[in-house]
Image: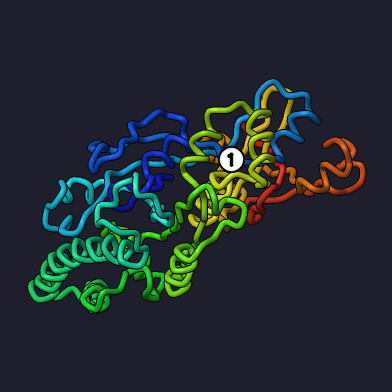
Amino acid sequence: MKIGIVGLPNVGKSSLFNAITNAGAESSNYPFCTIEPNVGVVDVPDERLDVLGKMYNTLKITPAVIEFVDIAGLVAGASHGEGLGNKFLSHIREVDAIVHVVRCFDNDKIIHVSGTVDPKRDIETIEMELALSDLEQVDKYLEKNSKLVKTTGDKSLLVTVNMLKKIKDILEKGGQARNLEYSDEEQKILKNFALLTSKPVIYVANIGENDLAKETNEYVEIVKDIAKTENAKVVALCTKIEEELALLDKDERQLFKEELGIKSSGLEKLVKASYDLLGLMSYLTAGEKEVRAWTITKGTKALQAAGKIHTDFEKGFIKAEVVSYDDLVEAGSFLKAKEKGKVRMEGKEFVMQDGDVVLFRFNN
């Protein structure tokens, strides 16, 4: 799964990316320092893995991961090519969700592309460019599918045509495609178009160091109000501090967080929120060789979950021995959990739950 980091130039996108991946992407005080997207993979924080690692005295711990893509800053007119906009917009089409970084701090030393700090204006600028770009795409799709209905008489395409008309209407009114309700059939069709405004969004409110403890200020509240109207999530963090935290080892990081008066880093909250935004969860496998989290979508059945490990697991599936993480930890071992009747034998149709610890049985 890919998540694109977007926003106006100089709002903290590359600093956020550096903190997430510790990849050292260039972060400079001028627009467009990022031309090609930087890509980094980040672990999904999961304390359960460390607990199971100690329980099994495991040799290796492998967490679930999310891929983040740092996309260059958009500006007004991007949909018409301003600031290399078309190139940047094409990068956004390739991601599954969007992290929209919004500047929520005052600092005269850091240049704002519009001269002043105004989260509402900044969000509207980005959303307008995404909507205009989508509108151009929707017009093309609409024209093509309408012609096909006339020339082929294929009435099944009417679902697509009517959906595109609905999307065009909301885009022309300044709305976003993700704010519409879609039938199951429409949702399947919508995925084929990769519309920018159909992608789920998390707003990252980039705050100053002085606002760290309370995680809010008047700018953040503006972002939260906007997010409520879109059913979007908001994570407030200070990208500068997060970048510094990322350079420390685990013990130093914990001490620094205590000094700052924060329990968990903004990045940990962001990664977890991103995982949840995409409708993802983890099931776990545990043994002496490895403790691992496997990423699946919510609602995945045991048969498909087995296939995540290896296709042979899916082809030769017999059953899944399943115990919840909490029951396993309480029992102290898989064997003791079995003795207490906490380990269940589940078939192909079993719907996996977050934190299930699983041992798949299969025929070679």
Residue visible at 83% across and 42% down? Answer: 329
* Residue 43 screen position, x and y as percent: 55, 37
327 over 316 or under it: above or below = below
* Residue 248 screen position, x and y as percent: 58, 28
Q: Of 256 and 284, which appears nearest the observer?
A: 256
In the drawing, does residue 219 fall left or right of residue 85?
right
Answer whether residue 257 is visible to the viewer in this image: yes
Answer whether residue 92 is visible to the viewer in this image: no
Q: Of 254 and 334, which appears nearest the observer?
A: 254
Q: Can you tell which quarter of the image residue 200 is in?
A: bottom left
* Residue 233 screen position, x and y as percent: 50, 62
Quarter of the image where the C terminus is located: top right
| Tally of marks | 1
Question: Badge 1: how crowded within 10 Å, few (<14), some, or many (20+)?
Answer: some
Residue visible at 26% across and 63% down? Answer: 125
In the drawing, does residue 333 fall left or right of residue 243?
right
In the drawing, does residue 213 fall left or right of residue 142?
right
- Find disc 1 in the rendering and name its residue: 294
Q: Secondary structure at mark 1?
A: strand
Quarter of the image where the N terminus is located: top left
Q: Of 20 and 292, which appears nearest the observer?
A: 20
* Residue 16 screen position, x and y as percent: 43, 42
